[in-house]
Amino acid sequence: MSTFVLMAGGTGGHLFPAMSLAQELRRRGHIIHLMTDHRVESYGGDFPARSIEIVPSATPSGRNPVQFTLAGFKILGGIGVALSKLRSLRPDGVIGFGGYPTFPPFLAARLLGIPGMLHEQNAVMGRANRALGRFAQVLALSYENTRFADTLAARKQLTGNPVRDKVRALAGTPYPALDDTGPLRLVVVAGSQGARAFSDIIPDAIGLLPEPMRKRLQIAQQCRAEDLDRVAETYRKLKINVELATFFNDLPERAARAHLMICRSGASTIADACVIGRPMILVPLPGSLDADQKNNALVVDAAGGGWIAEQATLSPPSLATRLSSLFGEPETLRTAAAAAKSLGQPNAVEKLADAAERLVVRGK
């Protein structure tokens, strides 16, 4: 039995793969602790860890020297806090999942000589992982061709992006029957907090669909809290069967029932959809650092599992045209679902857990 400290930024994109690994390592009899930031309160309430340790951190910005200096001091303070916590927890190994909240505890682990592994979820290495890569013994990758990974000396291993147990449980769910008269189930998810652009564009696009198609639609859409009322009013006027929420706790189950998803192309969103095997219209987050979401989406698009729709050129008419075409061609959707599933890696968590166990064996 070993003790592991998992380290992750406090958003779903970092916490969900960490949660998946925690579930698997606990099944194997290991002790798990989590180090993250205060945002864990929104997503990590059911994180399977013996303790959840909050460590101060900050995102450095090179544009403002005052903010950069303040961030540096906060990171130094976080390293001090993490050193104290790690001395108390005495882990055999640490695994970082990216995001700047990983930075102070992973550096502290390095100072204490604790073996460390980093996991990169995206097709482009995040900046925090790039900065920490020189201190890691192992770099676990989700994509075979991960940009910037070759510049690091750490041992590389392709594991895939682990998904949570409730996603893996749905991996064998067949693609829902789709005919000329039955329901058309559409799931709209824009990251862990929703997106205003989706609230602006998608309801109006639905309003441009042929009326017989609109009557068949069953939509589940994630929205920001401030957008809920106006989106609900638009759908009410259109008489659309819709469920709106700021966050769906049962999103994997909804995805399994869906014929099509409209989503951002964050690593965890794509990993979940591919394991379940559902086609996606992917709208990469504009302005994301190093275009990580765009590069994730390109992998899915190239495999035929989805279609990229750039937000800058996405409009209600263009989206309505795409939806009308796809829902009118069931075989296209079924083929894309199969292609998405071919990218799914339901066993990624076992590979990552194996790598974690080898890490501590080598470190002893």
Image (cartoon, grey):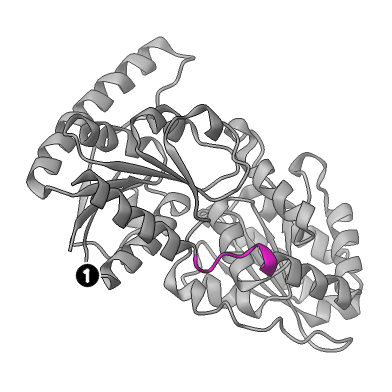
Q: Secondary structure at mark 1?
A: loop
Q: Residues within 10 Å of mark 1 (few under 14, many from 20)?
A: few
Q: Position of residue 194 (x, y in %)?
A: 57, 54
Residue 346 forms part of the magenta stretch: yes
For image coordinates 47% across by 60% down, the residue present is 162
Front residue of this view, candidates 271 and 321: 271
Horizontal relation, residue 348 to residue 73: left or right = right
Quadrant location, the N terminus: bottom left
Residue at the extreme top:
65
Q: Quadrant of residue 300?
A: bottom right
Residue 79 forms part of the magenta stretch: no
Above or below 62: residue 248: below
Q: Quadrant of residue 16?
A: bottom left
Front residue of this view, candidates 13 and 362: 362
Q: Which residues are magenta?
A: 341-347
Q: Quadrant of residue 216?
A: bottom right
Residue 51 visible in image = no
The residue identified by callout 1 is 29
Above or below 229: residue 53: above
The amino acid marked with disc number 1 is: Gly
Horizontal relation, residue 82 to residue 217: left or right = left
Q: Position of residue 236 (x, y in %)?
A: 71, 72
Badge count = 1
Q: Position of residue 146 (x, y in %)?
A: 59, 40
For image coordinates 56% across by 45% down, the residue present is 122
For image coordinates 11% across by 47% down, the residue present is 90
Above or below 89: residue 325: below
Horizontal relation, residue 358 to residue 84: left or right = right
For image coordinates 44% across by 30% down, the residue present is 153
Horizontal relation, residue 52 to residue 151: left or right = left
Q: Position of residue 67 (x, y in %)?
A: 37, 18
